[in-house]
Image (cartoon, rainbow, N blue to C red):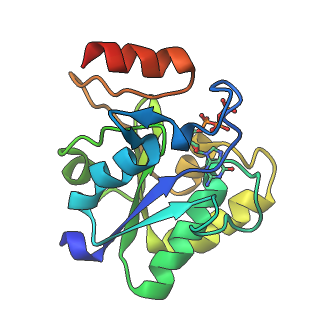
Amino acid sequence: MSTQIVLGAVLAGGRSSRFGSDKALALLNGRTLLDHAIAAISPHVGQVVVCGRAGGLADRPQPDMGPLGGLNAALYHAVDHGFAGVLTTGCDMPVYPAQLPALLIGERAAVVEGQPLLGWWPAPLAPMLDAHLAGENNRSIRGCLEAAGGRAVPLEGIALPNINRPQDLAALQKAQ
Ligand SMILES: Nc1nc2c(ncn2[C@@H]2O[C@H](COP(=O)(O)OP(=O)(O)OP(=O)(O)O)[C@@H](O)[C@H]2O)c(=O)[nH]1
């Protein structure tokens, strides 16, 4: 599939309660984590949207529904603008493995095993996600994946930094 018809979504809302301040704006090598996440996914998609913060797409149907609210906003953007589907990442994930698009796209829906923020969601799933968000257990990415008939795909041999706490950022800075 051409990268031009794939939308990239950086999920960037949430509370950052473990980090203690807005982690999207934390600095790594002089750039924000949000900028790292955007730059990392950009080569693999036709357009990048940021979901869940000022200046980006507003979560659907409302804020504070967790990452799936951001995914829903991205899916409707994909529908409205002719994208086939959405590759997702988090603002707290400064690395996007180059092999992921080939691994995920083509599935009915897919996430990386153990890293459910890294996913592939075809645009026609938008109404299904509406229904999932209106139901019980509506924050569960796994439940949404099951409802979509998707699967978790293993990604072996790659360390994926995920910044939840200040210590995670410090460890990444030290390793560089
Ligand atoms: N758009 C959107 N993104 C979210 C939302 N909640 C979390 N995220 C994003 O999803 C990713 C994983 O978030 P978590 O670390 O699990 O949650 P968090 O609220 O950011 O942080 P904690 O309060 O420490 O759990 C991050 O990239 C967040 O920015 C939300 O309600 N909307």
| Percent position of residue 143, x then y | 62, 44
Would you say 135 lies left or right of 124 here?
right
Q: Is residue 96 above or below residue 18?
A: below
Placement of the C terminus among the 4 image quadrants: top left
Judge by depth and name the residue closer to the eye, 50 or 54.
Answer: 54
Q: Is residue 124 above or below residue 133?
A: below
- Does the rendering let one see residue 1? no
- Residue most toward the front? 30
- Does the rendering let one see residue 168? yes
Determine the quadrant in which ligand 1 lies: top right
Judge by depth and name the residue closer to the eye, 142 or 31.
Answer: 31
Judge by depth and name the residue closer to the eye, 18 or 20.
Answer: 20
Residue at 39% of width from left, 50% of height from top?
A: 35
Placement of the N terminus among the 4 image quadrants: bottom left
Residue 169, quarter of the rendered image: top left
Would you say 22 lies left or right of 157 here?
right
| Percent position of residue 133, x then y | 73, 58
Residue 170, quarter of the rendered image: top left
Q: Is residue 146 above or below residue 148?
A: above
Would you say 42 lies left or right of 54 here?
left
| Percent position of residue 88, x then y | 43, 53
Q: Is residue 105 above or below residue 170?
A: below
| Percent position of residue 15, x then y | 71, 39
Residue 55, quarter of the rendered image: bottom right
Q: How many numbered callouts? A: 0
Residue at 66% of width from left, 24% of height from top?
A: 18
